[in-house]
Amino acid sequence: MVGQKKQKDPVLRPQKNFSRHAYTSSLRQYRKLYRRSIKKPEEFWGEQAKLVSWSKPFSKVFSTPKKPFCKWFSGGKLNASFNCLDRHIPSRGEKTAIIWQGEKEDEVASISYRELLDRVCRLSSALHRYGVKKGDRVCIYLPMIPEIAISMLACARIGAAHTVVFAGFSSHALAKRIQDSGAKVLITADGFFRRGKLINLKAMADEALSQCPAINNVAVVRRAKNKIALKGGRDRWWHKEMAGNFPGYSKPVAMASEAPLFLLYTSGTTGTPKGVEHTTGGYLVYSTLTAKMIFDLKETDIFFCTADIGWITGHSYIVYGLLCNGATAVMYEGAPDAPDPGRLWRIVEKFKVSIFYTAPTVIRSLAKEGEQWPRRHELSSLRLLGTVGEPINPESWRWYFNNIGRGKCPIVDTWWQTETGGILISPLPGAVPLKPGSATVPFFGIEPEVLREDGTRAKIGEEGYLAIKKPWPGIARTIWKNPKRYIETYFSKFKGKYLTGDGAKMDEDGYYWITGRIDDVIKVSGHRIGTAEVESALVSYHGVAEAAVVPVPHPIKGEAIYAFVMLKKGTIGNDNLKVELAEHVKKEIGAIAKPEAIQFAEGLPKTRSGKIMRRVLKAIASGSADVGDVSTMADAGVVQALLEGRNK
Ligand code: WTA
C-alpha cells in the first residue's frame, strides 16, 4: 500500500512474578548473554552443563569429528535417571514429582521424588531379569499414566534406550517401530479410557507382537481392568513384577555423554517414519536448561503440560527437563474436553497450576466453546502460559492471553521439533517483549537463518527456509540405523546447516515468524504426519491405484488431511468406500492420520517427468480456482476435472 506507513506489530510486556535470573531480567541482558553464547559457545555450554550431575567430568565441550555428526561433552559420564531422581532425594525427597489426574475426576495420584525413585528402581531390576542390558532398546506403548515416566527412567537407569510409541498409534505402526528399533522388551497396559470409551491396548499390542518375534518379555500395567490374555512365558503383570523380591536399590549405570538415551519415531517425507536418536549428555543439558529458563522454573511451581508423553514435548517438558530440575509435573490421562470443555481449567484450579503449556489446536477448540468455561474457575495460580506444535494465530493468542492468563501472564510461544530435543526459538518471560503470533527470539547458542533457495539470506520480512547454522547440545545425533538419511534430510540442502523443514520470516526487531512446514509434513492438531505415510497406507488398500495427500486449512485442527485417490479399474468410488479407506488408514497408522476428506480422481496433475504437482492439489483441496502456473503440466485437462470433483 503506497504511501501508507507500515504498522508495527503490537508489543506486549505483561509482568507477573518472575524470578529475575540475572540473565533474563531484561531484553538488554538477554541480548548480552545471547551474544556471548554465540561468540564463545564452548565457554557458555561448558558452564551450563554444570546444571546436571556428571559421574565423570567431560573433557571436551563440542566436536565434529565427522561433519555433520557432532559430539557434546565428550569424555563425560552421567545417568539421566540419577539426575532426575537420586540427586533430588536429600533436598526434595518428599516433594511431589508427578501429580496424576486420571480421566475420571476422582482418580488422582501424587508421587514424591522418593516414591518415584523406588518404583523406578523396582522396574529397573525387573528389566534386568528380562535380560535387558546397557545398549539395548525397550519399547513403551502406554497411555498417560505415571508408569510411562517410570518406564522411561528405568530404561535410562540401566542404560537401555527407550522408544515410546504414542498409544494412539495402530498395531501396525507399533510393529514397524518395534522392528526398526530392535527392541526386545515391550511395556504396555491392558487398556485405557478415552472420553469414557475403553481402548483395548493389549489387543493392539498382541496384534503387533505377532509380527515381532524378537520381543520375549512384555510387562503389562493393569489400568483399565478389562479382560485380556497374558501369553505364558512372555507376558507378566507389571504390579506383580514390581512387588517381587527386590534388593532395594538399583544402581544407575554411568553412561557416556554420547550414549543413546532414546529413539523417538517421527514423520518425514517418505512413507517410513524415522527413529530420531537423542543422546544422554547433550539432550539432558539442553532440555533442563530450556525448561529452567524459558519456563522460569521456581521451586514452588506446578507445571502442567498437556502433551502426550508419546511425543517429544512430553519427553522434554514432562519427564526429563522438568524432573531434572526437581520440579512438579501434572500429568493428565484424558481428553481436553472430557467430560466438558472446562476440564483443563478444572485441573488448573484443583492443583493450583502455575505454568500451563499446550498446543494452539487445544486453545482453538476450547475457545470455540466460549469464555464461560474458564470463567467458572479460579485460575489465579497461573503465572506463565506456553504454546507449542504449530503456529498460533494472533486471535487465539489473544483469547488465551485474556481468558486464561487474564491479561497478566506472558505467553511463551515455543518453536522446536522432535529433532531439536528442546525449544530453539521462544521469548524469555519477563525479559523479551511479546508479539502475538511470533515465537520471537532464539534461545542461547541458537543461530537461526532464513534462507532463499540458493542459500543466500532472505531480507527482513521475506519468507524463506528456516535453517540453524550450527549444532547445539540437544540436536538429534542421527536417524537410527540410517545416518545417510540424517545427512540427506537435514544437512544437504544448505550444506552443513540444519534444515528445519519450516518456512519463516524475520521482522525488523529480529523476531521470527514461523509460517509452517514447507516439506511434505502435515500438522494435524499439532500432530506430525507425513503425507507419504498416509499415501502409502491408502495405496496398500486393494482397490487403490494411486493417492496424493495434501493439507487443507482447518479452523480447529490448524491443518487437516485431504486425499485424492485414484481407483483401480473395476473399483467403484462411493461414500462407503470413503469410510472404508478412512478406516484402513486408521488401522495402518492411527486415528490421527484419518483423512478429513477423500476425493476420487480420474487423474492427478503431474509434470512431464511424472512428479505429482502438490501445489496444484493444495489449491484445489482448499477450494481455490486459482491453481497458479500449470505450464509444466503433462495434461492440463486434469485440473478442470479435479475442480469439478471438488465442488461436488
Ligand atoms: C511445528 C513439536 C510454529 C513446526 C515440538 C515444526 C511450530 C513442527 C511451533 C515440529 C511453534 C512446533 N510455532 N510452529 N511454536 N512449535 N511447530 O516434531 O512446523 O512434533 O517443524 O515437535 O511443529 O513438530 P514435532
Image (cartoon, rainbow, N blue to C red):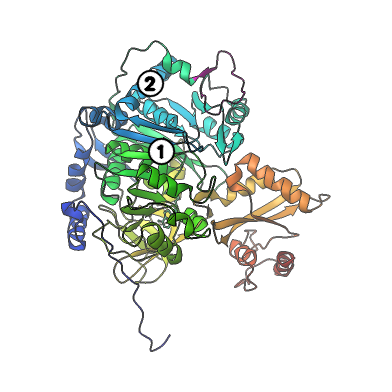
Q: Give the range drawn in magenta.
A: 221-237
- Disc 2 residue type (three-letter): Ser
Between circles 1 and 2, the one closer to the viewer is: 2
Quick check: can you spot residue 596? yes
In the foreground, 293 or 512: 293
User: Split into 4 quadrants, where in the image is the N terminus?
Assistant: bottom left
Q: Which of marks 1 and 2 is nearer the N terminus?
A: 2
Extreme residue toward the top, this view: 245
**Residue at mark 1 to residue at mark 2: CA–CA distance:** 22 Å
**Circle on res. 124:** 2
- Disc 1 residue type (three-letter): Glu
Quick check: can you spot residue 269? no
**Circle on res. 277:** 1
Q: Alpha-carbon neighbours of circle 2 within 10 Å: few (<14), some, or many (≥20)?
A: many
Extreme residue toward the right, this view: 570
Q: Is mark 2 on a helix, strand or loop?
A: helix
